[in-house]
Image (spheres, rainbow, N blue to C red):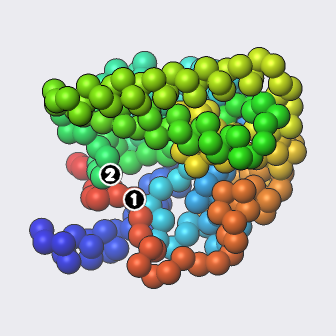
Amino acid sequence: MNMNNLEKYLQDHLSELQHKELEILCAIKDVCEKNGIEYWLDGGTCLGAVRHQGFIPWDDDIDIAMRKDDLPRFVEAAKRDLPDGLFVQTMDTDPSCRLPIVKVRDMNSLIVEFGDDFRRNYQKGIFVDIFPMIPYPDVSHQFCKKIVKEYCRANAILKQQHTYSWRSVAELFGFGGKRILCAFIWRVAQQLLPCKTYFSNTIETNGYGIMHRADTIFPTSKILFEGEEFTAPAHPEQYLCDLYGDYLQLPPMEKRKGHAAFYKVKLV
């Protein structure tokens, strides 16, 4: 399949992919409501709900967030209550997976992202991402961006596949030291400063150093997404400003693309 045919295939089947992801999201919602677990629409999914009342037209994924402390309870409930054919993926339930986020995947499908590693036999079905979120210390936005972004950059480089070379040794010491230092500074801030004003992703999943005021998330609200009601941040417009700035401005045409390299909505 050449690139033009592949792009046409992805466009022609995008609505099927979105429908499958919406099914997974509805199943997650049912598990959360049954077990009293709070979640909220995050990232481009929250943006789509506000700006398009559903999927961003070219988007091919769904993101939600949850308190990190609630995730173990969600994982256990999901193992018990998810419909047949759905699988809750963590580093414990799928040891070949190394991602610090939870995914709920459909087992009878396939999605390939550009960062996927086919040397590892982790489940690669269509999924919904669940990002863990934690209270942040009362630091400045500038401090947060500096420490968290540097940590994520060092972490990403260290997790790349390396072959032995002097460069890889230098990266191990240089970026390894930077990651340790940033993590130490962050832990000190968490211990010494109040953690009541801000709430955001764990530092491993916060590559942009975003900080949300906790009162823009809690108490959560309700929002329509593709005709279904889901939980959203208390003030989704401010939440989206934190993430995107002018979130109502559409990106240029060349950036209106999804994240997937390939997908097949039904395998058998």
Name the kind of residue labelled 1 in the image.
His
For residue 126, side relative to residue 132 (left or right): left
Name the kind of residue labelled 2 in the image.
Glu
Q: Quadrant of the N terminus?
A: bottom left
Identity of the residue drawn at 27% across and 58% down = 262
Q: Is residue 82 above or below residue 149?
A: above
Q: Is residue 224 above or below residue 76?
A: below
Identity of the residue drawn at 58% across and 59% down = 44
Tell me where residue 8 sits by quadrant: bottom left
Please provide percent x and percent y for residue 266. Answer: 29, 53
Q: Nearer the viewer, residue 231 or 254?
A: 254
Disc number placed over residue 126 in the picture, else none: none
Element assignment for label 2? strand
Asked if disc 2 and disc 1 are in contact, CB closer than 8 Å, the reply is yes
Say whether disc 2 or disc 1 marks the residue closer to the N-terminus.
2
Q: Residues within 10 Å of mark 1 (few under 14, many from 20)?
A: few
Instruction: Identify the residue position indicated by label 1 in the image.
Output: 259
For residue 206, side relative to residue 109 (left or right): right
Element assignment for label 1? loop
Disc number placed over residue 113 in the picture, else none: 2
Q: Nearer the viewer, residue 208 or 90?
A: 208
For the view shown, which residue lies furthest in the bottom direction?
253
Q: Nearer the viewer, residue 106 or 263?
A: 263
Q: Residues within 10 Å of mark 2 (few under 14, many from 20)?
A: few
Instruction: Count all numbered tags in the image, as a single digit.
Output: 2
For the view shown, which residue lies furthest in the left direction?
1
Q: Can residue 264 be seen from the camera position used here? A: yes
Identity of the residue drawn at 61% across and 20% down = 184
Identity of the residue drawn at 27% across and 73% down = 7
Please provide percent x and percent y for residue 168. Answer: 25, 30
